[in-house]
Image: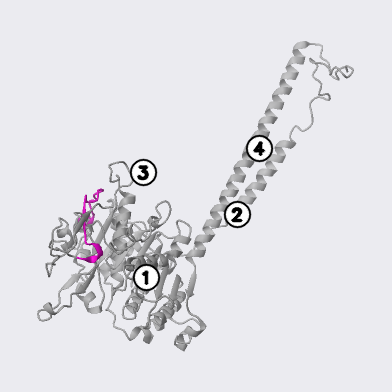
Amino acid sequence: MLRRQPTPVVVAPPRIPFAFAHFFVSLARARQLLMTDSKPLLASTTDPEKGAPPDEPSKPPIFTFSSPSLGDAFHRSTRLLQHDKTRRIAAVVVLSCLVLWTLVRGVTASKEARLRRAARTTQRLEGFSESRLVQVPEGLRTQYDLPVDGLLGHPLLSSHEVPVCRLNAYQQDRYAPLLPSYGNGGRRARSGKPALPHDLPRNKLRYFVALNLFDSEEVFPSLIRALTGVLRSLGPSRFHISIYENGSKDDTPLQLYLFARLLRQLGASYTLFSDPRRRAGFQENKRIAGLAQVRNQVLKPLYDAPKGTWDRVLFLNDIHLCEAEILEILLQHEVQDADMSCGMDFQYLRIPAFEASGYPLLFYDVWVARDMRGLPFYEIKYPTGDWKLPSPVMPQSPSRFRYDSLLPTQVFSCFNGISILSASLFLPPHSLRFRTHESGNDEHSECYLLCSDVWKTLSPLNLDGTSNARGGRGARIQVVPRASVGYKVEEYEAARKDRNTTAFELDGEERREVLGEELIEWHPWPPKLVTTYPYGHWDDQISIPPF
């Protein structure tokens, strides 16, 4: 766990009372201006030059002047005073309008601020009726707060195998810019040289963490431990945990209840929903529609909150990982100024052909991931659909050497078990959602279609060559090899890259050179064609436009 120092809580003064005070002070000034010169300079309002109205007898003026020039000067000065008074009144009216506009704007901004605070402090657990609470261990149902370490050691979690996680000193130094206590550039800001993107403070960002769970009792303890370490390090108030669980027949709902107690003790906000009525599985040819629905369901608190409530959305599948993988992908997303960042997920290919020689560890999300040439991460022969196994990742991509060197690499699409996106993509004016193919069937993954929609939204040009009305810079989607995860503990242990920290141990010019090599040279244009395999049929290869 990263070591951090507590930071003082600064409470902003309320804006509405100040606006009201400013409004009443302005009214007092307006009254003072209106009271000035309130008495007329002349006792009569009759214009001497025009005389009295024809239906009234002529009345002699109260004041007369023996000299015409003196009388003209007097009347000119009177009109000037009247014009000055008019200008004063106009100024008061304009000032009052500005004050009212400021007041209304302050009320609106204050309302949005209240809604943001409410969303960031929500602690909601749903789906546990009295009949389901009976299944929860009695020790967890107490009304008293339970210690975090005691909850982490509860048999619901400790009875399952989890990886051993620990950050060394070099990792703590690398991820320090994410800490709330990190200064403006850290100790390296005093070197007199421009700060690297890796050293800039990233401690003001707020994260929305989304998980979908089903029969996940074997992996949920790893996720709970990793998230607890991240929240303790970066500050629980910067996170909102949203989980949608449905149809589980194992201990996943009980672990979810325990996690709610743990998050409440940490002081983090959460929306945890357990739906026992929604059965697992999907209708034939409607699997992607079902997956898109549950993914959008877990994002509902993000959709309902005001814009600016959270900055990033972190997706976690049912994977094993440590704190280091989450911190690495959070850091690289900011360093590379990316729109979407993915880790790499791995799984053993457990088939009889490899039983004697050992099951090969393969990249898992091959149906979704495509490189910048539009090719899958594995070489799949056409037209037979045979895989070349075991196969290196991205064997035909120019970016293969960056990947092999554990450097972030631009891709067309990915999801890969762990991914982070800019929250603005899911909010107006973009309002992206997980979806199915236009036909409504399982032709493409909902995660692949999300990446395609990101490119469509941010591409500089449309497919017909016209300029994109949104003025995109091109989608910046990357894979982060150091954030490698697995679906079983042994698969994670074989895939994890967090123990290779040689590059973190450098300093001075050597460090600047190595970190400079990490930076991606982004290409704004997607591939002209993307190779896809409808319905996951590897012998049915087609090439389609990127969006």
**In which quadrant of the rendered view does residue 175 lie?**
bottom left
Q: Is residue 88 left or right of residue 54?
A: left
Please report the residue visible at 26 percent of the width from the left and 53 percent of the height from the top.
546
Mark 4 packing: few (<14 Cα in 10 Å), some, or many (20+)?
some
The one of 254 and 507 positioned closer to us in this rendering: 254
Q: Amino acid at mark 3?
A: Ala
Task: Give x and y (percent) for residue 249.
Answer: 37, 82
Query: Is tag 2's residue or tag 3's residue first in the polypeptide sequence?
Result: 2
125 relative to 107, above or below? below
Residue 290 appears anywhere in the view: yes
Q: Amino acid at mark 2?
A: Ile
Q: Amino acid at mark 4?
A: Val
Which region of the structure is painted magenta?
516-537
460 relative to 266, above or below? above
Q: Which mark is residue 92?
A: 4
Task: Give x and y (percent) for residue 527.
Answer: 22, 51
Task: Give x and y (percent) for residue 542.
Answer: 20, 57
Disc 1 versus disc 3: nearer the observer: 3
Residue that extends furthest to the left in the rendered view of this protein: 357
Q: Is residue 91 left or right of residue 329?
A: right
Q: Which mark is residue 211?
A: 1
Instruction: Mark 2 and mark 1 in contact? Answer it, CB < 8 Å.
Output: no
Query: Is tag 2's residue or tag 1's residue first in the polypeptide sequence?
Result: 2
Marks 2/1: CA distance? 38 Å
Disc 2 versus disc 3: nearer the observer: 3
Disc 4 versus disc 3: nearer the observer: 3
The one of 466 and 51 positioned closer to us in this rendering: 466
Q: Amino acid at mark 1?
A: Leu
Instruction: Mark 1 and mark 4 in contact? Answer it, CB < 8 Å.
Output: no
Disc 2 versus disc 1: nearer the observer: 1
Q: Which mark is residue 469?
A: 3
Number of labels in the image equals 4
